[in-house]
Amino acid sequence: MASSSSFKDHLGRPIIAVTGMGVITSLGQGLSDNWTALTSGVSGIHAITRFPTEGLSTRISGTVDFIDLPAANPVERSFAFARETTIEALAQAGLDGDFNGPLFLAAPPVEPEWSDRFALADRAPPSSHPGDAYERFLAAMRERPDPVFLEAVQFGSISERLADYFGTRGLPVTLSTACASGATAIQLGVEAIRQGRTDRALTVATDGSVSAEALIRFSLLSALSTQNDPPERASKPFSKDRDGFVIAEGAATLVLESLEAAIARGAKVLGIMKGCGEKADHFHRTRSSPDGKPAIATVHAALSDAGLGEDAIGYINAHGTSTPENDKMEYGAMLAVFGERLKDIPVSSNKSMIGHTLTAAGAVEAVFSLQTMLTGTLPPTINYTNPDPAIELDVVPNVKRDADVSAVLSNSFGFGGQNASLVMAREPA
């Protein structure tokens, strides 16, 4: 029988095991289909058909179109993706019935489409409510509440519905920390178990918010790729001709448990959440600090939390958005942490195939990082035909590779200065 000390980490905290995973991306539904496509270098990026794109500079995305859902309802889409990945994760974890633990959900901060806002504003004409259209919209919502519409535009309702569906314990937590959200949700689950508040936690990240308005907003920030033809070649992280990210949808769920509780119930341990790090970047509301200091501090914090040195990391799942400045900053940050050894560490970006799933990205990539260790296969970075001489990385170019990896770093560096990194290991020690 294992001693109680064997279930503690280097700081005397409970070791955190992952016992279930589920994922949906534009590549398909379920971990098996996603992993097969991802390691085969298949792209899920395609021309947008959900809404008209005439006149838009970007007309491609990684939307999830194989599930029949209301096209204009991002809350319903995000809920459905989260529900399906959680069903998969709980089945793999061997858990049924009510989930005896808290729910931490990363969800997109969606808003009503402008057409809906104007329609509601018309209910309260200017004569009765002086002011702009948005003020009339709020007035109309107060005077003539529409419960169905209200739930459809309140992203906080997603966690409540998931909590009811899966019987989670306590008040569900909804968070949104931009592109770092999925990793942040995992971190909250890790901390809840470490602090002794629970033996298990359900961590979910979902995003079904691709819309014409979202496309226009990111285009105005010059963040999206405009290389529309062919769509599958648009996302090219760390390449010289990268020109922006491809907006996408997806979801992922991870079941976290204390290692002691997981072993006690005979669960299969898929991997270990060793360390989490996060740092804020106040440089700009959308751009990361060019010197990479907040990202460097984030990676160092994750390694310290994990009790591992830089030489322990055998693979890096990069944030790798394919935007010119972000990829350059991330490379500089990794170089500052790993030095000359960086050339020998494989670093790939899943976003070359699935696009940027925004709120869901950190969790989706955590699932793929764990799968890398479980299968001994490094997913490639596709579309890498024009290397950037200023970025010297082994990006696992275009073709998967076999490798024995025991520890992985996964980075999530988001808009608004939200930075999060996760360190995952195959074994507890």
Image (spheres, rainbow, N blue to C red):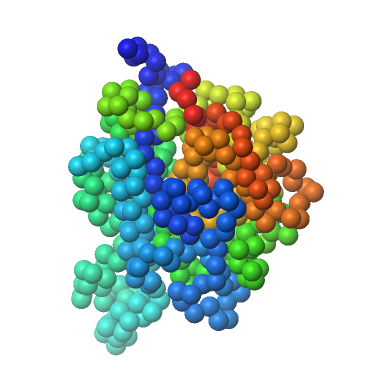
Q: Position of residue 5 (x, y in %)?
A: 38, 13
Left/right of residue 394 with respect to residue 69 in the rendered view: right
Picture residue at 38% right of the left edge, 72% below the top: 72
Left/right of residue 366 with respect to residue 103 in the rendered view: right
Above or below: residue 226 compared with residue 13: below
Tell me if residue 416 can be seen: no
Res 340 → quadrant: top right
Tell me if residue 8 can be seen: yes
Left/right of residue 111 with respect to residue 245 in the rendered view: left
Picture residue at 21% right of the left edge, 51% below the top: 164
Picture residue at 39% right of the left edge, 22% below the top: 13
Left/right of residue 330 with respect to residue 210 in the rendered view: right
Q: Position of residue 324 (x, y in %)?
A: 68, 56
Q: Position of residue 323 (x, y in %)?
A: 64, 57
Above or below: residue 211 compared with residue 339: below
Q: Position of residue 17 (x, y in %)?
A: 39, 30
